[in-house]
Amino acid sequence: MTLTDTTPAPPAARTRSARKRLVPYWLLLPGVLWLLVFFALPMVYQASTSVQTGTLEQGFRVTWHVATYWEALAEYWPQFVRSLVYAGTATFLCLLLGYPLAYLIAFRAGRWRNLLLVLVVAPFFTSFLIRTLAWKTILADGGALVGALDALHVLDVTNWLGWTQGDRVLATPMAVVCGLTYNFLPFMILPLYTSLERIDGRLHEAAKDLYASPATTFRKVTFPLSMPGVVSGTLLTFIPASGDYVNAELLGSTDTKMVGNVIQSQFLRVLDYPTAAALSFILMAVVLLMVTVYIRRAGTEDLV
Amino acid sequence: MTDSTHTGGDVRLSGISKSYGSFTAVHPLDLTVPQGSFFALLGASGCGKTTTLRMIAGLEEPTTGTVFLGDRDVTDLPPYKRPVNTVFQSYALFPHLNIYENIAFGLRRRGITSVKKQVGEMLDLVQLGDKASHKPHQLSGGQQQRVAVARALINHPQVLLLDEPLGALDLKLRRRMQLELKRIQTEVGITFVHVTHDQEEAMTMADTVAVMNGGRVEQLGAPADLYENPRTTFVANFLGTSNLIEAEVVEAASDVVVTAGGGTLRLPANRCSAPTTTGGRLLVGVRPEKITLAHADDAGAIAGGRNRVTGRIVDTSFIGVSTQYVVDSPAGAALQVYEQNIERDSRLAPGAEVVLHWNPAHTFGLDAAQSVLAGTVGDAGLDEAEDAA
Amino acid sequence: MRRLRKNLVVIAGLLTLAYMLLPNVVVMLFSFNRPAGRFNYSWREFSTDAWRDPCGVADLCGSLALSLQIAAWATLGATALGTMIAFALARYRFRARGAINSLIFLPMAMPEVVMAASLLTLFLNMGVQLGFWTILIAHIMFCLSFVVTAVKARVMSMDPRLEEAARDLYAGPVQTFLRVTLPIAAPGIAAGALLAFALSFDDFIITNFNAGSTVTFPMFVWGSAQRGTPVQINVIGTAMFVIAVLVVVAGQVAAGRRKRTDVS
């Protein structure tokens, strides 16, 4: 055999590798097409709908009527702000309530770990609408819980804060936030648990060995290391909560409507499509903007 | 594969190379591995040895060149059509199959349904008969390694490729598995091509070793040849330790005579891998264990005709079977000397004036244009290779 | 006092767990209620009427069957498409990788109502009749990303040498995929499929926008919150909860037993 530096690859090998290069594109094609047609394209249609004018009878046409955005914001800004405040509060409460449970499962549960995990996921098996309706019973006027809160003067404080009204919890902001918190808690706990569980237990021992008190150990070691879980947990809670209208509808009143309620009723009842599309578009923009800024600041790229 | 006894067991690589974009992992390379031999590709990580192995297996397509098994050109054959099997680094045992099914995998894929007898024989060969129904994760590292060998050998390949097969084992087990693999190879008589970064492993196991560096074969030969007569500084330093002394040629006949640090040294011309011209430069090398150390007071008792270098001991360390000395001399700093602990001379302590002397036939000459440090720990070339890997 | 402080996190965690499980207890309790009016919100007296006749309410079991059917098809579709994407992302280098990653990520970073509303504008503009097919399309769309995430994680953690070993041992591309890749990726695919089923079965917001007059089980519950909540809703909710928990526990026990016999 002669030895040359530049023997070209035989043609058979080249067609083999050419065909191989196409494999990923074939794998991607159906799914990506699905997302393009039923996720990306609708965004375009929604944008176009938001600048249309017309009536249901005569049909809508694109007139670049951008004023719809200002009109929608001017009319529905309270619902908008409410959405962000409720979702933010619920997210904070989820973190506050979820962290101890995730910590408990990750570090203290021992052989009960799997059982606890099943119990965290178990509520999912009952439709969330049924479970949300159950809060109507739990928070019912004159019920045991409300009675207890009243006796402990908790309601006096929440009344003063404007979260509740008189001796009612149902149909107040507190009920809606309570429902949101309840519904999205598992989405906080599971990512938190995943990132806590990855922490090497020896790090705790090392921290203690290096003169850190339990509180300092948590502040300087455990919590920073669980940041990926905190970030994805808060996102998985905040994003769906900001667009939710089920809790506000079932547990709230006309004074607790969120932007989701407005979009839903404009689309499905009032049939004012341009306004609904504009509101939906603004919600999307605001959420994406907040998420982007948040991810940048938290410095975590790989989420969920 | 029925014809493992046929003369078609040679592996021939002809002008084979592999590039990834602008990075060349393997420069065009010619290599013949004779049938039935135990061949080792030795080098630091990133030197191209694994890429070469993968091109033989068919897991990597060569950029140029041809792979022959016997007279058959297999360059275009995918791995599952080549009569070649691999023992992978960290074994790559199928975690979802038990040991029996792992070993039977190759036979089943070739449509053989009655595998029981052959699998049984293989399990016996690697002494794992009682583990057949276990899953890989229930086995120790050494046992997994043996399963990986059995899984490949059951197919009676013409060539068995081993990619750092012992890298994940601890030192003691590694030594045992080296002997075990050697025994199996002698028993089955199949060509083994073995990739490793461990020079001791390569030398104990292989008949022929190819030392690779930077995508090229630096030197190829029997382990003793490579060790006694290295032809590059890389080989001299990578295989064991060498003292390399920069010298000037004063006479180039059947013996080459050089001067270094005011003294004269001589070596046989046939142990010079570089052209020698009077007045030219040469790197003179000698292994630390070839040198005898004498206290300066006893210099008169040294036999004539030996190479001598005077110096002063700067450091000694007691190893057990031997003592290692570091000696500074006008010819070169930090020369290494290993002395067997037979009769220890208590005068040989740091600060002592000494004479190093050795048989000129143990001296080798290298091209002085190379880096003296190539192949040593911390050598820039090795670090680069590490990064590339 | 010291003990209390040491176990503070345990107490807080268990309180959260109680908060999460309380509604399930209420749902179960009220499945044995005989309510006074149309709404099953306050306790009157014990009764097993609803348990003896779970389909006694018009359309309830029909909507349940429809939801199960849609969830099954959506799971199948999303798992197939999502697994393919996951393999492409985990195993190959190609152009537009970043863009495709974003396309997968965005549906998960978007409030459901936005996806629901925009998909409805598409269907309205196209003049598509809303119903079974539009629900199925929507469900496959939003389940897809979750399947991709679950499967991709599994495939990424898989040693590529296993597939090389299979090819080295005479398995062609198809055999390699069926005998090695698929079995090893199976837990990830199963996790993705389960998630897709749960998401699709329990989805309300996207279905609410794109169902037209078709009524899935969540839609039925939503409607009943306005018209009156039959006790049978609680029966169905409780039954599914109990069945699912039993299946999970049985699975865990079986897995534990298998592990033990493996070792012996």
Image (cartoon, rainbow, N blue to C red):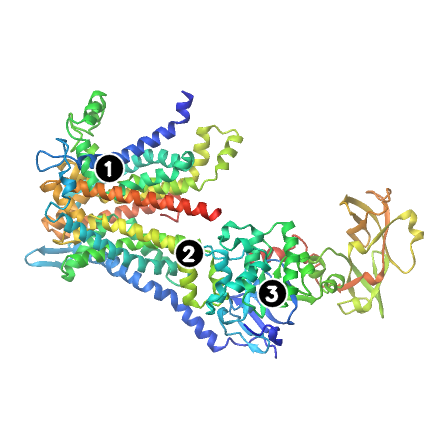
Query: How many numbered badges does the structure rendering display?
Result: 3
Asked whether the viewer can see residue C93, the reply is: no
Q: Is residue A277 left or right of residue B245?
A: left
Q: What secondary structure is marked by label 3?
A: loop
Q: Nearer the viewer, residue A150 or B365?
A: A150
Task: Calculate the distance from the C-alpha at mark 2 to the C-alpha at mark 1.
Answer: 36 Å
In the image: residue B354, left or right of residue B198: right
Chain of the residue that carries numbered disc 1 in the rendered image: C
Tell me the kind of residue under disc 2: Ile
**Residue drawn at x 9%, y 33% as measured from the top left:** C36
x, y percent for residue A93: 29, 34
Residue named by callout 3: B215
> Which residue is labeled 2 in the image?
C184
Q: Residues within 10 Å of mark 1 (few under 14, many from 20)?
A: many
Question: Which circle marks residue B233 in the picture?
Answer: none
What residue is pinned by disc 1? C24
Q: Is residue B324 above or below residue A203?
A: below
